[in-house]
Amino acid sequence: MTAAADCKWMEILLETGYAIIPDLLPASELGALEADLEADFSATPFGDGDFYGHCTKRFGSLLRRSPRAASLVLEPTVLALARKILAPACERIQLNVAQAIEIHPGEIEQFPHCDHDMWAGIKGTHEYLVNVMWPLTPFTAENGATRMYPGSHRQTIEALEELGDPIAAECGPGSAICFLGSTVHGGGPNRSNSVRRGVVIGYSLGWLKPYENPWLAYPPSVARQFTPELAELAGYVQHRPNLGNYEGQCPSILLRDEIPSHPRATDSLRPDQQLAVASFARERRDGR
Ligand SMILES: O=C(O)CCC(=O)C(=O)O
Ligand SMILES: [Fe+2]
C-alpha cells in the first residue's frame, strides 16, 4: 500500500473511529489460517459470561496455534497505523491480543463497549489501543458482523441510549476492520444459520498490562521461533525505563542459545533520564 493510501486510512480511522480496509491480505491466506485453526474451533467450548457470550467460542495464543497468524500481526499497513496512533503515549507498542472469535447462530448482540475500558486510567488525552478484526468467514449484518458506532470515540457516553445507530462492518476475508480503543463496538447478533468467524489482533501502549498474557501464551521455547520484530511485540523487550525486565536485562536474553545464569542488571533508560542520572552520579562521585 502506498504512503498516500496509508494516510487516507489514518484519516478515516481518526475521523470515524474505525476503518474497513479491503483486500489487505489475500483471502487464501485467511482461508489457510482458518484451516489451521479448525481443530481448535471444534475443541473449544462456548464461553461463559454475558460479555464473552454463551453461544460464542474464543481462544487466544494464535501465534502458537498457526505460523500464519504472524502475517496478520505483522501486516505493515495496520502495524504502521497502530504505531502512529499510539506513538504520542509510548515508546513502543505491544501485542495486546491475538484471539479467534466464533459467533454461533442464535447468539445475541454483544454489550456495546470501548475496549480501552479494560484499563482504569484516565481517558480522553490519548489512545490506549488499536484493534484489527480480520474476518475468516464473510461478515454480514445477518451473521454477526462487528457493530461499530461511528463517531463514538469522540463522545462521552453515559448511557447506551445516547449511542446513535451502529453500522455492521460487512466485509470478507482479507479485509481488516480497524478500530480505536475509544470506539464503541460489539459483536453483532447471529441471525443466520452458520457461524461467523474472525480473528482479533490488538496492539496497545507498550507499558500497559496486556489483555492476553504474552509470556504465558508464548513462553521462551515458543517465542524463540519468532522473528525479532514479532518477539518484541510479544513482550520480549523492555519499555524504557526498565519496564518488563528479566533479572535487570532485556527479556530477549531468554531467547538466546546461551542464557547467562547471573545476568548483570543494566540500566535501560530514556535519553533524558540517562542524562539526569549520569549528571547526578558524576557530581556524587566528585564528592559534590
Ligand atoms: O466478535 C466481535 O465482533 C467483537 C468482539 C469484541 O468486541 C470483544 O470481545 O471485545
Ligand atoms: Fe471489543
Image (spheres, rainbow, N blue to C red):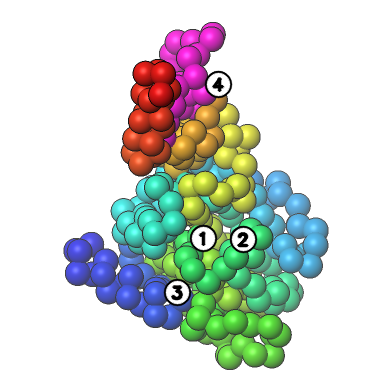
Packing grade of label 2 (10 A; few <14, some 14-19, many >=20) is few
Packing grade of label 4 (10 A; few <14, some 14-19, many >=20) is some
Residue type, label 4:
Glu
Q: Are marks 4 and 3 in contact (CB under 8 Å)?
A: no
Which residue is label 3 attached to?
18
Tell which tag, 2 or 1, sits nearer the viewer.
2
Which residue is label 2 attached to?
121
Q: Is residue 190 above or below residue 232?
A: below
Left or right, 43 with respect to 221, comes to: right
Q: Is residue 251 magenta?
A: yes
Which residue is label 4 attached to?
247
Q: Residue at x 80, y 62 (%)?
A: 49
Cβ of mark 3 under 8 Å from ligand 1: the answer is: no
Q: Say whether disc 1 or disc 3 marks the residue closer to the N-terminus.
A: 3
Q: Quadrant of the C terminus?
A: top left
Residue type, label 2:
Gly
Q: Is residue 182 above or below residue 258?
A: below
The picture places residue 152, in percent across and down from the top left corner, at 54, 81
Q: Say whether disc 4 or disc 1 marks the residue closer to the N-terminus.
A: 1
Residue range (magenta): 247-269
